[in-house]
Image (cartoon, coloured by chain):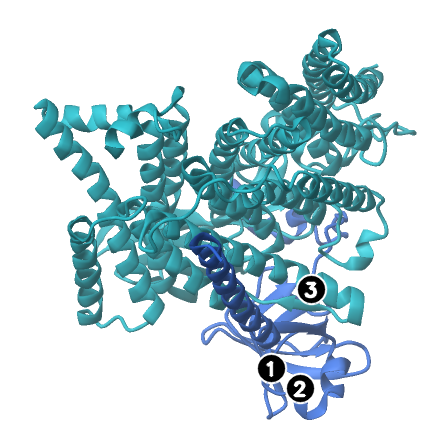
Amino acid sequence: MTRLLGLSACAVALALAVFGAAAAVMGARLRRPELVRSAIAAAYANFALLLVANLAMVYALVTRDFSISYVAQVGSRATPLFYTIISLWGALDGSILFWGLVLSGYTALAVRWSRAEAGAVLPYALAILLAVGSFFYLLLVGPANPFGRMFPVPVDGPGPNPLLQNHLLMAIHPPLLYLGYVGMTVPFAFATGALLAGGLDDRWIRLTRRWTLTAWGFLSLAIIAGMWWSYEVLGWGGYWAWDPVENASFMPWLTATAFLHSAMVEERRGLLRVWNVSLVVATFVLTILGTFLTRSGILSSVHAFTQGTIGFFFLAFIAVVLLFSLALVAGRSTELRGTGRLEGVVSRDTAFLLNNLLFTAFTFTVLLGTLFPLAAEAVRGVKVSVGAPFFNRMTIPLCAALLFLVGVGPALPWGRPERQLLRRKFVPPFLALGLVAGTLLALGVRAPFTVAAFAFAGFALTANLGEFADGTRARRRAHGEAPPRALVRLVRSNPRRYGGYLAHLGVLLIALGITASSSFRTERQATLRPGQTLAIAGHVLRFERLWARQEPQRFVVAADLTVLRGSTSLGRLDPRLNYYAASAEPVATPAVRSRARADLYVTLLAFEQDGSSATFHAYVQPLVIWIWLGGAVIAAGALLALSQRRERRSPGGERLPAAAQAEAR
Amino acid sequence: MTPGSRRRLVLAGGAIVVLCGFGFLLYGGIGENLVYFLTPSELLARGERAYDTPVRLGGQVLPGSVRWDAEALDLRFRLTDGTQTLVVRSTGAPPQMFREGIGVVVEGRYREGGVFESTNLMVKHSNEYRPPAPGERPQDLYRTLLGEERS
């Protein structure tokens, strides 16, 4: 019954999506508004249908209805309710179902919120959204059908992948990732929809920018949550390994970030249109490519790929999207010609161009490193992996340069700035740069990129804080407001601009955290008997005892450790090994003591079965916690920038946010 | 040629030069940092070229060959693929799952003395779950610990 309900909801959604896409385009071409309205109704109905299908699956999971293939694949009677519910996105078929829900939700919201602004573009954008939707609904009734019939009905299932039921963050990271990933479909739809509709004006850039910013905010949070999960669950002391799965989420973030910056050049100067459309298309294609890489099984081996059919669907879809977009851009090349021109070499325009160049190079590096092993295996038949050294060597200089630009961009005015202004803007950041670099060198730090990263971060921090300070001072002088009130008013007067600077501050926190924790990391391994201690970077760990416990879904072996400073106890840590019924291999759960200055991180590697000794790996890494906080600051920046509703046309014909005009004068 | 189009040409030219330079760096970087996935036979078949390059080596831990010094955290064992066998030396504790006869992947370099120095030891596992074999169930393995808990 549940099976039939879920499956038919997906099938009807597919039919409605195909119908809606056709109706929207025909309605626009034949000027039949009732057809467009029926397409809009189809979009809303799709959201309802996908909601029904997802709830049906959750119901089946919770009631442990093993007659449904997906439940038989990921469910088990022993799994606690919470992890049973979130196993909705724990494997391929369910994650596509959830993807469908998010996509139909975005489609409905795009129609609801952007209908008035999009005008003639809406039917085309809607058609694109529904067409993308029909691809995913097709997967749901075809190769990734989660509602398959199991006969004979199994008595119990294996339960979700142990790694996915080991931490609460698994309830947060995947939905955020889907909100980010799937959200990139909306800007793609508005960009290609605007090209299809013709008569391209600057409306398209505002629509795509807003929706990209929304999805980008979610994607930023998702990547940070993924790093945090990896840190808290995988137990190797790190948070980023240039794993293809991580790269898959990172590449669209890079191109979307590039777009958020280059969109401003188009708004100001009417330039870079083809480039901006390309970035939006690239971002969307990279989300699909990422899904293909992580979901088709191709990563473990090219040969695993031939076992499932879903990979071919994704490849065909990517090919169709690329051909379609290419044809569209080529066909509209005259409309896409830039109208303005660049001024001044030392200006914000140039900073944006450099920013885009670096982000492109960055994306290309990650893409090459991710795809190279696949190509090598397919072409030469050898199994290779591209190690982290490649990624680090290529991207650390790029990161350093980008950090520098985070400071240069905001401090540089548009157009042709005066020398005096430049001097005033750049003296404090360069002083900070020199100060940080000098201090580090004096302290004996010699690694060039560590010094550079800290110095550039200091530079950028001063420059971005300087923007807040300058604005506050100006308001104080002009309106006689007290500094706190002036700051609040300043930010409110142009949330988009200051949201951007706030996001920069978040990036800087992350850069500081990553540089500090990877440069000044201490680690030690030791085998201890109860009562013995291990000293690491000012901390002493005393192994008290080993204990074990049977929990409903798993068997836990844990070690009690006391953290000591001198003879005073600072607290307890209990790293564990969790044994799940479905797998002979334990999942290590590290114990982490996070403080503003540093994290103490301990894993239990091995133990004697009689509890007489245990082997531990301890890490002390400074400033790790600031990485997670930086993620929250980035999201707050995105939210702030999104809060800007009204944008009006300036007398000169340039489109500026109302408040930026006052500022620009 | 208008100043605008000349500037655009210069910009485009600059971008192409930068990207080409970067592409060259990438090409070199990837060549140096490729880690081949090999079996002991394949590694030994490379002769002189086998030494000192980063490799991932997969095989089975030869039963009876494991020497583990818990104090010095020094692990030695023989890795075999059925035809060839290599001595592996690894610093750091092996994972709890490590035991004789199990499939492992070691990451490191083969040295001229004929010892493979591993920096990272991973127990090979497939994503397909299999139920633990008799004797592998944690309850069987750690009965001592459980007993302690209950008493």
Q: Are marks 3 and 1 on the same chain?
A: no
Chain A: give its colour. Answer: cyan
Query: Camera-side residue: A297 or B85?
Result: A297
Residue that badge 2 annotates: B50
Q: Residues within 10 Å of mark 1 (few under 14, many from 20)?
A: some
Contact (CB < 8 A) between labels 1 and 2? yes
Instruction: Tell me, yes or no, if residue A539 can be seen here.
Output: no
In the picture as drawn, the residue positioned furthest to the top comes out as A34
- Residue located at (36% from left, 52% from top): A511
**Chain in blue on the image:** B
Instruction: Tell me, yes or no, if residue A44 can be seen here.
Output: yes
Q: Are marks 2 and 3 on the same chain?
A: no
Q: Nearer the viewer, mark 2 or mark 3?
A: 3
Query: Camera-side residue: A514 or B151?
Result: A514
Q: Amino acid at mark 3?
A: Pro
Looking at the picture, how far across and down is residue A201, in whole percent? Answer: 54, 29
Q: Amino acid at mark 1?
A: Thr
Subunit of label 1: B
Real-space Cα separation, disc 3 to disc 1, in angstroms: 17 Å
Q: Nearer the viewer, mark 3 or mark 1?
A: 3
Contact (CB < 8 A) between labels 2 and 3? no
Real-space Cα separation, disc 1 to disc 2, in angstroms: 7 Å
Looking at the picture, how far across and down is residue A233, in whole percent? Answer: 52, 47
- Residue located at (76% from left, 81% from top): B42
Residue that badge 3 annotates: A373
Query: Camera-side residue: A326 or B120?
Result: A326
Residue that badge 1 annotates: B53
